[in-house]
Amino acid sequence: MAGMPDLVNQRRPRWRFHLSGGRIFLDLANTVSWRAGSHPIDRLRDYGDFVEWARQARLIDGREARALERNARRRPWQATAALRRVRALREAIYDVFTSRAGRRRPDAAAVDLLQREFRRALRHLGLAVRARGFALTWVTSTDPLTRLLGLLARAAVDSLISDDLTRLKVCRSPRCGWVFLDTTRSATRRWCDMKVCGNRAKAQRYYIRRSSRTAG
């Protein structure tokens, strides 16, 4: 469609996401790199990036990812709106959960947005009979472009009303800002990912020690 952005750019190599938040909605919040720095990088540049993130996070499989991409090409305006909602939900989740980690009151607008997406999700949930009992399921009329939003909003709200947030932390790197759940036995985890910010911090400490010895 003329004038529309390329919502699913298959020619550009996809980013390999770091899924180290401990909860799927925290991994969504961490799709902005170097949040606390002066030049944050949004890794959800188009709708295809969101689909790829969901595939890497194992929310969908390859077949479902291809179906979502085809749907996005057929319905570019709806895909643009869906991506806008994804980013808005991501920022709301980030604000609410970093506020919890810092023992601060979250922004009211962020809470309202999370609640709106949660209520939308509830409208599309149904009860299914399984061999061993009952389960919640998505009704078939749910828009596939936004169904994942409901799953993420519900997971975030379920976590907020549980007691598993006592180990919620923000990465100690001054440029990072990623939020994660510390599931280590000792509860001493400091970095979002030891392979990323942890190694950077180690390299920086080594450089400072070596520079000090050289100067002395």
Image: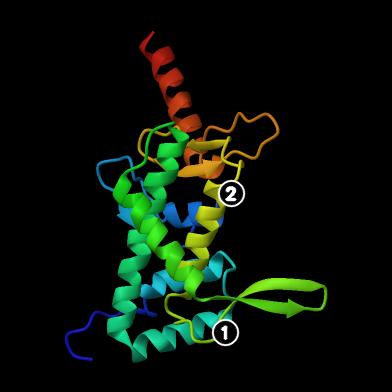
Residue 94 spot, x, y in % from top left: 40, 48
Residue matched to label 1? 63
Q: Which residue is mark 2?
A: 22
Upstream in the sequence, badge 2 or badge 1?
2
Q: Quadrant of residue 186?
A: top right
Q: Residues within 10 Å of mark 1 (few under 14, many from 20)?
A: few
Viewer-closest of 50 and 153: 153
Relative to 216, is 134 on the left or the right?
right
- At a point 35% along the width and 74% down the height, the residue shown is 82
Q: Which of the two residues, 176 or 93, is positioned nearer the viewer here? A: 93
Please report the residue visible at 39 percent of the width from the left and 8 percent of the height from the top.
Answer: 216
Residue 158: where, in percent of width, then height? 56, 54
Q: What kind of residue is marked 1? A: Arg
Q: Amino acid at mark 2?
A: Gly
User: 61 and 167: which one is in front?
Assistant: 167
Quadrant position of the N terminus in the picture: bottom left
Q: Quadrant of residue 140?
A: bottom right
Q: Residue furthest top?
A: 216
Spot occupied by residue 77 in the image (x, y as percentages of width and height):
27, 83
